[in-house]
Structures are given as structure tokens and as C-alpha cells.
Image (spheres, rainbow, N blue to C red):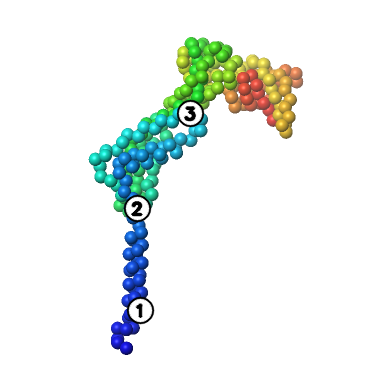
Amino acid sequence: MKMYDKFLPKICHLQALCAGLSLLSWGVSATSYSMLDLTTHTTNWLEQQVPDQSVNKLKIQVYPLDSRLSDKNCEQSLQMSLVNVQLQRQNTVRIQCPDTGGWQLFVSAKVSQLVNAVAVTRQLAAGSYLSNDLLVQTETELLQSRGALVNDAQFIVGARTKKALNPGQIITKNDLCLVCKGDVVTIAGVSNGLSVTTQATALQDGTFGDDVKVQNLQSKRVVTAQITAVKRVEIKL
């Protein structure tokens, strides 16, 4: 036996290990992204960031990256994030490659989300009662709206305005009292699917979902009830 024969197993093992490492490194390939690819990737990602299912129309305008820039390579999946705290009308999206010594790019994008809304047809003073002829269904930009929108005109017929409204102004729930102090309202007592109704006087103003105090017209008992519709409240029995 030659002296180096005893080293042959170790040499073979080392060769196999090197071959395995070579195959492993061969299997890791970077993905190449053109500027057009990254622009499209940003658009698709933004579409997934819209949380509101009531959106009627979604329009995303991503300002294209400079096509003269060279392609970007990344072995790992790209990471996307908003530079702003949350989605806005004007946004900056950060694209990051998390590779060691990776890269990042910033893309500007405009997002428009149209939702159902209700507007008034003419000038209204504070304290006006709303009727069908004073209301019109429309759409508005969600990200520019202030307050909780009313999306169905029939929901607020009979409600009273809490402040003056201009022609064409979009109505929010905070602009109205569905139950106003002094109104005679229907109070429903609900228990195990059964409902019993009676009349009460509202002691506070409120809009949909608010808890207000009302006084039963018969028993004179004062209770706290939740507003469920115009001049209608509900308590759990």
C-alpha cells in the first residue's frame, strides 16, 4: 500500500463536498428586474393594500421609473412598503432587495378610491329636515373625505342637519342627528330575537351607532339606548 492511499477516502469526500457546494451555488440564481417590471410590481402591490371593500372604482397611477436605469438583480423576494404611515392619495413606495449588499428604490404613486356617497342638492340651514328631493346619490374620493360617509340617501330621510350645508356638499354622519333632543322616537327592546316597541322622548342628540338617553313616555323611566335608524333606538333586554 502506498502512503497516500490512506488519504484517498478523505480526498474523495472533500471532492464530493465541493461538488455539492458548487451545485448549491448554481441553484441560487438572481431574478433580474427591469424598471418596467418594478413599476408593474408596484401597481400590483398597491392594489392589494386597499382595505375598504366598499370601494366602487380604484385607480392607481404609478409614475414610471426611468427606463434608462440598468436592470436590478435580487436573489430573494422583493420587499415592498409605504414610506407614509398609511395609504394616501399621494404615496411613495419603497422597493427593497434584502440580499446582503442589496438595493432600494422609491416609486411615486397616486391612488384614487371612489365610494358611494350622498350630497345635498341645495343650501341647507342648520336644523333642516332632510327629504328625498334634497338628497342625491353620488361618488366621492374616499381618501379625501372627512368623517364617516353616508352611502344611502334613504337611510337619512327624516334626519336633521346639525350645521349649514352647501349645494353639492357630501354628507357625513357627524353632520346629522338621526335622533335629536326632544324627538319622539321608537324604542325597541330586543331579547332572543324577539322585539317589543314603545315610544320615548330623546334627551340627547346622536347619529347612527351612538348611545343616547331616552325617557319612556309611559313609565317615565330613563334608559340608554343605541341609535339604529332615524328616530329609532334599541336596547337589549
> Relative to 216, is 118 on the left or the right?
left
Mark 1 closeness class: few <14, some 14–19, many ≥20 residues within 10 Å: few
The x and y percentages for residue 166 are 46, 13
Depicted 65 relative to depicted 181: above or below:
below
Judged from this view, the residue extending furthest toward the right is 219
Quick one: quadrant of the C terminus? top right
Residue at numbered disc 2: 75
Q: Of residues 198 and 204, which is closer to you in this image? A: 198
Q: Residue at x 59, y 24 (%)?
A: 208
Quick one: quadrant of the N terminus? bottom left
Q: Of residues 143 and 208, which is closer to you in this image? A: 143
Mark 3 closeness class: few <14, some 14–19, many ≥20 residues within 10 Å: few
Q: Residue at x 48, y 30 (%)?
A: 55
> Relative to 188, is 16 on the left or the right?
left
Closer to the chain start, of discs 1 and 3, is 1
The x and y percentages for residue 221 are 72, 22
Query: How many angstroms separate mark 1 from mark 3 (CA)?
Result: 70 Å
Task: Look at the numbered disc 2 and give the secondary structure of its residue.
Answer: loop
Query: How many angstroms separate mark 2 from mark 3 (CA)?
Result: 38 Å
Residue at numbered disc 3: 56
Q: Residue at x 38, y 49 (%)?
A: 77
Query: How many angstroms separate mark 2 from mark 1 (CA)?
Result: 36 Å
The x and y percentages for residue 130 are 56, 14
Closer to the chain start, of discs 2 and 1, is 1
Residue at numbered disc 1: 9
Disc 3 marks a residue whose amino acid type is Asn
Disc 2 marks a residue whose amino acid type is Glu
Closer to the chain start, of discs 2 and 3, is 3
